Every structure is written in C-alpha cells, then in structure tokens.
Amino acid sequence: MRTTSGSLYKKKAVQLWRRWTLWYAHRRSAPKPPIPPNAVRKILIVCTGLIGDTIMGIPTMRASRRLHSEARMVGLVMPHNKQLLEPQGLFEEFIVCPVLPFTIWPWRWLKLWSVLATIKALITAPSQ
C-alpha cells in the first residue's frame, strides 16, 4: 500500500513541476509593451564610476538623448565625471555626489543627505 501512495506523490510532484516550468517559461518569454518615447519626462542617469566607465557609457547616454529628446536628463555624477560630461551637452542638470552613493560606510551616509534631497526635489517637481 505504501508504494502506491509514494508513486502517487511522485506523479503529483512531476505534474506540479511541469505546470510550474510551463508557467515560468511563458512568463519570462511574454513580450512587454514598449514605453513610447514621448511618455518619458525625466531621466536620472547615475554615473559615479571611474572615468573609463563614464567614457564607455557616453554612447548609451547619446542614444537616450536621441530617443527621449523631450525628456529632462539629469546626471548623478562624481566631480571628475562632471568635468568629462559637461562639454558633451547631454544633461540639463548635474547633481554632484561627494562620495560614492552606494557606500557601505555609515559615516559617509551623512554626506549623501543633500544629494537625496536634490533627487527627491527632482522627482516631485512638476514636469515642464
């Protein structure tokens, strides 16, 4: 009697596993509707890495500017990145971050309060 219930359990588990994998495969492959370019009003690009990372990201920033020409682009940058990106003319505004924004050191978090306040003001400001 025990073998029958064990095999029944295995069959149910296999059925459940098959259903889950089918659902998961469908969910992952389901196409997402594209965002229309005119629907984007504000873009914040975080560029706080090294200069090489910034240089490699400039083509993507240019493509974002071309695609969303009506949007207001703001760059969250380190001081050395601002000097590199200012002549490019990609951003309307820069928010200079004095320390890395994703730091794990609590004593550096205090320097980020002004940056967070600026970002909140940017988000809550009405669109033009």
Image (cartoon, grey):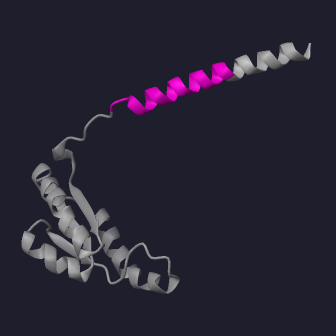
Classify residue 3 as left or right of residue 82. right
**In the rendered image, which quarter contains the N terminus?**
top right
**In the rendered image, which quarter contains the C terminus?**
bottom left
Depth check: give the residue in front, 108 or 2: 2
Classify residue 71 as left or right of residue 22. left
Point out residue 59 in the picture as x, y percentages from the top left corner. 14, 58
Residue drawn at x 45%, y 76% as measured from the top left: 103
Rendered image quadrant of residue 61: bottom left
Point out residue 92 in the picture as x, y percentages from the top left corner. 14, 68
The answer to whether 1 is drawn above or below residue 87 in the figure is above
Residue drawn at x 64%, y 19% as measured from the top left: 15
Depth check: give the residue in front, 103 or 112: 103
Classify residue 89 as left or right of residue 44. left
Residue drawn at x 42%, y 33% as measured from the top left: 28
Farthest right residue in view: 1
Point out residue 43 in the picture as x, y percentages from the top left corner. 24, 59
Depth check: give the residue in front, 65 or 122: 65
The answer to whether 88 is drawn above or below residue 32 in the figure is below
Q: Which region of the structure is painted magenta?
A: 14-31
Q: How many marks?
A: 0
Can residue 125 be spotted in the picture?
no
Residue drawn at x 19%, y 78% as measured from the top left: 82
The answer to whether 63 is drawn above or below residue 88 in the figure is above
Residue 27 in magenta stretch: yes
Rendered image quadrant of residue 51: bottom left
Can residue 90 be spotted in the picture?
yes
Point out residue 12 in the picture as x, y percentages from the top left corner. 71, 19
Residue 23 in magenta stretch: yes
**What secondary structure characterizes most of the magenta part?**
helix
